[in-house]
Image (spheres, helix red, strand yellow):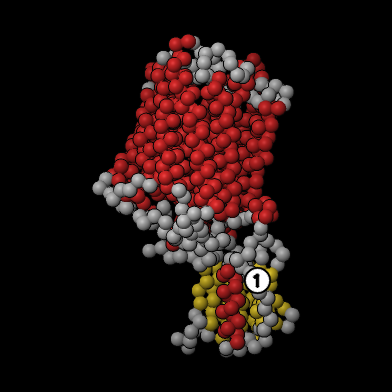
Amino acid sequence: MTTRDNPGRMNESKPEFWVVIHPNRSFSGRNVACVLCAYVLICVCISTGFALDGAWLVAPFMGLEAMIIGAVLLYVAYHARDREIVVIDGDRMEIVQITGRAEHRVALQRYWARVRLEAQADDWYPTRLLVGSHGRWVEIGAALTDDGRTSLSKRLHSVLRA
Amino acid sequence: MASATANHEEHPAGLKRWLFTTNHKDIGTMYLVLSLLMFFVAGSFAMVIRAELYSPGMQIVQPYFFNELTTMHGLVMIFGAIMPGFVGFANWQIPMMIGAPDMALPRLNNWSFWILPFAFTLMLTSFFVPGGAPGTGWTMYAPLSIQAGIGMDFVIFSIHLLGISSVLGAINIIVTILNMRAPGMTLMKMPMFVWTWLITAFLLVAVMPVLAGTVTMTLADRHFGTHFFDAGGGGDPVLYQHLFWFFGHPEVYIMILPAFGIISQIIPTFSRKPLFGYESMVYATASIAFMSFIVWGHHMFTVGMPAAGEMFFMYTTMLIAVPTGVKIFNWVATMWRGSLTFETPMLFAVGFLVLFTIGGFSGLMLAIVPADFQYHNTYFVVAHFHYVLFSGAAMAMMGGCYYWLPKWTGHMYNETLGKWHFWLTTIFFNITFFPMHFLGLAGMPRRVPDYALQFTDLNRVASIGAFGLGLSQLLWVYVIYQTVKGGRKATSKVWDGAEGLEWTLTSPPPYHSFVTAPTVK
């Protein structure tokens, strides 16, 4: 997972602070399609060959496995461009969350915005980073590790205080 | 501004840590421990086998129990020791080598591991059911497997579970390598260990469904009145062999390609030179994987296939020697004029190189159809595959263990004991398996509890070697235990010639490997 930001004020045309959070994806959707097609082709060849020889029971297992692999790779492709963009500029704070094809935007008043790092009892997911105000909270940084969330929380705190 | 703090160094402790962990290092450790345990379980079966074969005649066990031990030794070593062992290495190393914080699908990773203990419990329970474990050999050939007792059903179900675990593990490895490489880590910059595992994972997903289908057909023949492999009902037992070896030969490469990867990491480190011919190594690995799908017939030359088929399988099998030769050449060329030192991992790598090459040559002998008619089902085959799988796969794992143990534990192992372990293993391995070439050439069949008197001397030598080999592995366990418990602190870059992202992390590495993705230049 990586974050990119512009904490300084070097260029006035850019927002005062922004951070883009996205999981590290080194494989594009196009590559996923190529791998999946090649794999399905191999599965079809193997299972057809054996089915013609009478061993048709190989085919359901091949099909089942192809479906699992297909599901995993399509999931990866669907989320290839997932990201969260947090922008702080002037008196505004905006959070844009892109998940698959869905886009969710939340605008907050900078001076009312609060950052909360919540500890949870869940061992698999020990912390949540929440940003919000007036009882409306948005979770960000779910793709980061715990250390990453802590560090982002500190940076948001300092920028919002400034 | 409200905030809550959390202790980020904290992670689950006790039993819950191991049951519910999604951390690649914890899961890697569990795979390695299970592999070591299974290595000793299957090794103890081998000790009984060699004790029985110490003298002609029946001494210790009944003939059928001998067959059960032979079957279980093979199944547990392959599915319990070697495969999980390499998956353990993959879990530990791949995220660290590609600059990822963890595996791509951590929960799936947890499930992949926890299927295994249940699968092996089921498999080993077959010893205690009426009729005992199957005495079919690890190949479970029909029609014998169709006629075997209920233990066969236990083994079939355990193979299904093991297959599910392997496939899920392979999918995880594929997705991790393809999708979670650090920026700049292009495919052709990946360490060879990562490459070999990527190719191995594709092999696994391609052939595991074939095994699943095959054992399901066996199950259907046993209980549901089908006749896939039953000649009496119009089925074909030879079809079973085709199916099994279509899985079984790529399986051999599933067990050896990650070993090639480990050796490709160790040799450059202790030669203090980059790996010679990196790209040719990648292409050779891919070629070996592709060719593994078109050579299965060499396991069944004697079933009576047409001469054209025998010729095809003979030539394709001999062709595999070309990419394998490229690899051996590149390892030797890496060492050539290198600044060599011989710490324990390098000793195991050099031992691998020499002994695996012997196994490769005996493989070439077995590839020649007329010669194979003499060697088939003799101890020559047993010698061949132990030179490939013990001095190949197992010794590569031992070398890999010594190579990365300081990184994993944060402590240096005892070099003197490590060297003792290497020399005892190598010497006793050769005492055990080299005489088997001559036993096979002289006509001693494999999988027999009794033999003719003229084979006594060489069998005694082999048995003494086997006891020594078994005992010397206890030293390995002791060295690992000692290193885990303490010892001289290891630095981040444990070996001065080591290159790669894993050596930029502390020893032991942090709970999450790379919090921020490193950039590879």
Instruction: Give residue A50's quadrant in the image.
Output: top right
The C terminus of chain B appears in which quarter of the rendering? bottom left
Q: Which residue is mark 1?
A: B6
**Of residues B319 and B343, which is closer to you in this image?**
B343
Find residue B276 and report its horizontal and vertical position in percent.
31, 48
Residue projecting furthest to the right: A135
* Mark count: 1
Note whether residue B307 is visible.
no
Is B324 left or right of B229, judged from the image as shown?
left
Is A139 left or right of B260, judged from the image as shown?
right
For image coordinates 63% across by 51% down, the residue present is: B110
Find residue B143 and report its horizontal and vertical position in percent.
61, 19
For image coordinates 59% across by 56% down, the residue present is: B23
Is B220 left or right of A14, judged from the image as shown?
right
Q: Height in image: B82 above or below B282?
A: above
Q: Height in image: B176 above or below B162?
A: below
For image coordinates 51% across by 50% down, the residue present is: B483
Find residue B460 and report its horizontal and vertical position in percent.
47, 19
The N terminus of chain B appears in which quarter of the rendering? bottom right
Residue projecting furthest to the top: B453
Is disc 1 placed on a helix, strand or loop? loop
**Of residues B119 and B38, which is closer to you in this image?**
B38
Q: Height in image: B154 above or below B107?
A: above
For image coordinates 55% across by 58% down, the residue present is: B102
Note whether residue B97 is visible.
yes
* Label 1 chain ID: B
For disc 1, the neighbor class at 10 Å (few under 14, some 14 to 19, many from 20) is some
Q: Amino acid at mark 1?
A: Ala
